[in-house]
Image: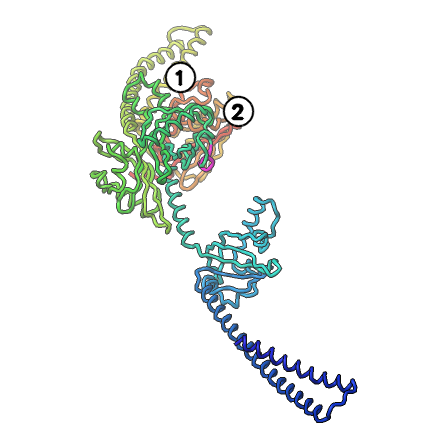
């Protein structure tokens, strides 16, 4: 069809050209003076004109047909283009990607259907709006901008300038972002941004293709939660736990092991042992030992492994090592080390001691049990396996009833209480019957929550305290023996001491003859020492009675202020002798208290004696008041005070804090006796002091009559 059209068009042009030549030829003949017959000329011109008209009409028709053909071709092309566009739109809208095109300044030109579905927008709501402010998390944009500035040292404006900078030179910029929808919905996405170029090769806009990575992010969070849960478990263990690869790099390390090097677990992970070990020779020896374990595929128990810590001290470790396979091609070593330095140091001292004492000082690893709500053991450690006489694999996956048939029900009840309350239960003392005999364990139970904050696991950490319990029993026996011995000796001394005191008094009073001054001075010194020895015996007997619960208390209603005034009169000569002021500040409307008058006088006398004894200048005050249904007594002085580190020892028996008793004399029992008396009355006693500024001793007594 195209060839015929071309031929027809060329022939028409030919005849038109021929007709014009005929007319031109006749014109030339006429002008040249040639005489032509008018009829010939007329017929020639008329024929030529008709021929030209015919061919012009034919040419116009052909032109019209060509136009119609071109319109038809254009319509066909337009239909094809629409079909192709519809197909492209169908493909884009059915794709599981959000596709957005923008202008150079970041305004949205087009979006596909997933954008609207994901974010809850109509397409028309997005067109023309700025991409960053409309669907991006601005904080993420700012954080990424700051990160790029730190890495590339190039200042970038926060916003769409970030995309401009990263897609320069035809680069494709890929990054994880969060798209924010119309109703605040947040969708994690992986976005690829590329520039659209015009015919001149300049940037005409941008195309952003986003993939929804919600499921991937969820899986990553779950993995992170599991890793964090495992890290929490191993960080509860006081032993050192680590995993290293064949290149000596730490893949995992717990806080106890990291602390040995004076670093955190984060600082050590990924580093070689030789990079952090202060002794390179030791590090190389450990590495060679690890490689032998990896190559042999067999676990190894190392009774003593020497390690130099961050302070340069040699530490003795007892280590279990075993091969650790992370994948088919990745093999490392898992190590669990117990620091036995203290045990090694103590062994030299306790070698001559009794076998029982030596066993008390031995360090014992803890049991670790990680179990679910159905009593199934999920994780266990080597210490538990050793106690059970089996391997860790023989315990994991088993029900608690299979491992502890006699104790499972009791253990489950305690575990269930922790899971229901969501609170840890620490320091529970339990006994277990093992093949080796009965053992005492101190157990901490910690609830572990899942992703929904529901407690679905419980962690048990049990420490063997069998030797400690036995030692406590022996210690109680020794204390009882000591108490009986002390009481017996004190009573045996008291009788002759009474006779000696009476004899001295008789001689001192002159009943046996007149004494000169020198004799009287010697006798006075002897009398003072006998009185001091008598007070010591009285104090020893009192503390023994109080500790044994054999001291009698006569509980009667008494006016406390009257008792204070009586003691004041007794102690005033002593304050006058010391040259210090003595004041009373008593609340006058105090009700009567119910207490043993003589014992409370003993407490007041002890406390005032100390206050006066340790005050060189200034004053001593006694204050009484009523607070919260209790009688509150304060004895303040401006004396030497007490060091902060000595306060906790102040109320212990036979304690001489800071050499005070050595300087002023005393048994070191007065405050211990006072504490026992006050606590027997249901009260409390304490001290507040600043060294060099004086002290304030407090005690309280309940004003309400005790029941029974």
In this image, 298 relative to 196: left or right? left
Closer-to-camera residue (1/238): 1
Give how far across and how far down residue 278 sits, in percent. 47, 26
Dot 1: few (<14), some (14–19), or many (≥20) neighbours within 10 Å? some
Q: Tell me the quarter of the image containing the C terminus.
A: top left
Q: Are marks 1 and 2 in contact (CB under 8 Å)?
A: no
Q: Is residue 554 visible?
A: no
100 to 384, vertically: above or below: below
* Residue 532 numbered mark, or none: 1
Q: Write the residue at 53% across / 52% down.
A: 173
Give how far across and how far down residue 111 sits, in percent. 51, 64
Q: Is residue 346 visible?
A: yes
* Residue 124 numbered mark, or none: none
452 to 570, vertically: above or below: below
For the record, the magenta segment spans: 263-269
Which structural element holds mark 2? loop
**Residue on which the image places disc 2:** 580
Which structural element holds mark 1? helix
């Amino acid at each position: 069809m195209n060839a015929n059209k071309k031929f027809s068009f060329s022939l028409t042009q030919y005849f038109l050209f021929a007709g014009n030549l005929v007319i031109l030829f006749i014109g030339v003949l006429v002008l040249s003076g040639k005489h032509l017959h008018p009829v010939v000329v007329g017929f020639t011109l008329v024929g030529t004109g008709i021929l030209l008209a015919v061919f012009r009409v034919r040419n116009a028709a052909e032109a019209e047909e060509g136009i119609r053909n071109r319109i038809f071709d254009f319509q066909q092309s337009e239909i094809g283009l629409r079909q192709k566009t519809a197909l492209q739109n169908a493909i884009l809208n059915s794709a599981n990607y959000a596709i957005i095109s923008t202008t150079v300044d970041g305004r949205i030109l087009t979006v596909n259907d997933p954008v609207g579905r994901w974010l809850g927008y109509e397409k028309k709501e997005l067109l023309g709006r700025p991409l960053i402010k409309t669907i991006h998390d601005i904080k993420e944009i700012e954080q990424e901008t700051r990160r790029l500035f730190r890495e590339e040292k190039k200042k970038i404006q926060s916003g769409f300038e970030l995309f401009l900078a990263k897609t320069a030179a035809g680069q494709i910029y890929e990054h994880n972002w969060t798209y924010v929808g119309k109703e605040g919905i947040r969708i994690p996405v992986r976005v690829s941004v590329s520039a659209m170029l015009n015919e001149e090769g300049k940037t005409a806009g941008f195309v952003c293709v986003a993939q929804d990575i919600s499921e991937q992010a969820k899986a990553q969070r779950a993995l992170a939660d599991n890793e964090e849960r495992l890290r929490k478990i191993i960080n509860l263990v006081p032993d050192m736990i680590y995993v290293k690869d064949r290149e000596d790099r730490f893949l995992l390390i717990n806080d106890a092991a990291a602390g040995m090097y004076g670093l955190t677990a984060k600082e050590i992970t990924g580093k070689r042992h030789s990079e952090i070990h202060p002794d390179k020779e030791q590090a190389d020896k450990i590495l060679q030992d690890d490689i032998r374990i990896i190559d042999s595929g067999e676990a190894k128990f190392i009774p003593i492994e020497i390690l130099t810590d961050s302070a340069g001290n040699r530490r003795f470790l007892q280590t279990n090592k075993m091969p650790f396979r992370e994948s088919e091609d990745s093999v490392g070593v898992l190590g669990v080390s117990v620091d036995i330095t203290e045990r090694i140091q103590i062994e030299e001292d306790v070698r001559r001691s009794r076998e029982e004492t030596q066993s008390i000082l031995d360090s014992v690893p803890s049991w670790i049990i990680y179990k679910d709500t159905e009593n199934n053991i999920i994780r266990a450690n080597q210490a538990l396996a050793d106690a059970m006489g089996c391997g860790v694999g023989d315990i994991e996956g088993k029900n608690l009833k299979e491992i502890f048939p006699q104790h499972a029900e009791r253990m489950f009840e305690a575990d269930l209480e922790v899971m229901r309350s969501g609170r840890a239960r620490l320091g529970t003392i339990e006994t277990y019957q093992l093949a080796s005999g009965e053992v005492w364990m101190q157990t901490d139970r910690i609830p572990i929550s899942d992703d929904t904050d529901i407690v679905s696991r419980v962690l048990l950490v049990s420490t063997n305290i069998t030797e400690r319990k036995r030692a406590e029993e022996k210690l109680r026996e020794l204390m009882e023996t000591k108490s009986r011995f002390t009481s017996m000796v004190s009573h045996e001394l008291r009788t002759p001491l009474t006779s000696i005191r009476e004899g001295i008094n008789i001689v001192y009073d002159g009943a046996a003859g007149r004494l000169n001054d020198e004799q009287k001075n010697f006798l006075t010194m002897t009398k003072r020492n006998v009185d001091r020895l008598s007070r010591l015996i009285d104090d020893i007997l009192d503390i023994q009675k109080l500790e044994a619960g054999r001291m009698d208390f006569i509980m009667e209603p008494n006016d406390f202020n009257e008792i204070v005034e009586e003691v004041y009169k007794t102690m005033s000569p002593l304050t006058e002798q010391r040259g210090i002021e003595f004041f009373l500040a008593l609340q006058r409307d105090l009700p009567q208290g119910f207490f043993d008058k003589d014992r409370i006088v003993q407490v007041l006398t002890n406390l005032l004696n100390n206050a006066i004894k340790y005050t060189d200048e200034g004053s001593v005050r006694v204050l009484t008041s009523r607070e919260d249904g209790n009688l509150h007594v304060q004895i303040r002085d401006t004396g030497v005070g007490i060091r902060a580190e000595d306060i906790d020892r102040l109320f212990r028996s036979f304690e001489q804090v800071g050499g005070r008793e050595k300087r002023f004399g005393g048994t070191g029992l007065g405050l211990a006796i006072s504490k026992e008396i006050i606590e027997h009355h249901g009260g409390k006693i304490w001290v507040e002091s600043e060294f060099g500024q004086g002290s304030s001793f407090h005690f309280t007594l309940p004003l309400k009559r005790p029941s029974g």
